[in-house]
Amino acid sequence: MYEHRKKPLLNRRLFYRRVLLHTSISLFAIALALAVGVVGYHLLGDLGWVDSILNAAMILGGMGPVDVLHSGSAKLFSAAYALFSGLFFIGIAALLVAPFAHRLLHHFHLDNDT
């Protein structure tokens, strides 16, 4: 997916295309993770759809839950979803930064090879 260190930098058009690909993958993954949270809160937490979206979005965004959960299974789901969301945030951030970091490091490495 990325060019080898001995190959030249991608032109801007192809680089922007790579950034768009990474952004698209990130948005799809966020939508999928949000959908899992919404369904989990709806089924296990006995919340309505709007409250489920709110709780899942708040957890996924790192803010914390809004509604109090009463069943043990809902609380376990919420704990697991919160842990998942923290690691997921790190992964999405890495996915979005990767093209820029690679281009920067590749640029510096090209300077050393000449």
Image: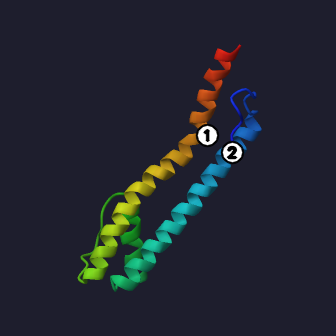
Q: Quadrant of residue 86?
A: bottom left
Q: Is residue 92 visible?
A: yes
Which badge, 1 or 2, comes first in the chain's sequence? 2
Q: Amino acid at mark 2?
A: Arg
SS type, badge 1: helix
- Give x and y (percent) for residue 58: 36, 64
Residue 18: give its label: 2
User: Would residue 17 be found to the left or right of residue 94 on screen?
Assistant: right
> 100 or 105: nearer the eye?
105
Please say if the residues under marks 1 and 2 sit with CB atoms less than 8 Å apart: yes
**76 vs 1: above or below:** below
Q: Quadrant of residue 80?
A: bottom left
Seen at 25% across and 84% down, the residue is: 71
Q: CA distance from mark 1 to mark 2?
A: 7 Å
Residue 99: give its label: 1
**40 vs 110: above or below:** below
User: Would residue 31 be found to the left or right of residue 50 on screen?
Assistant: right
Seen at 68% across and 21% down, the residue is: 110
Q: Quadrant of residue 109?
A: top right
Taking the view exactly as shown, the residue that stands out farthest to the top is 114
- Give x and y (percent) for residue 60: 40, 62
**63 vs 45: above or below:** above
Seen at 29% across and 74% down, the residue is: 76
Q: Is residue 61 visible?
A: no
SS type, badge 2: helix
- Give x and y (percent) for residue 11: 76, 33
Callout 2 crowding tier (Cα within 10 Å): few <14, some 14–19, many ≥20: some
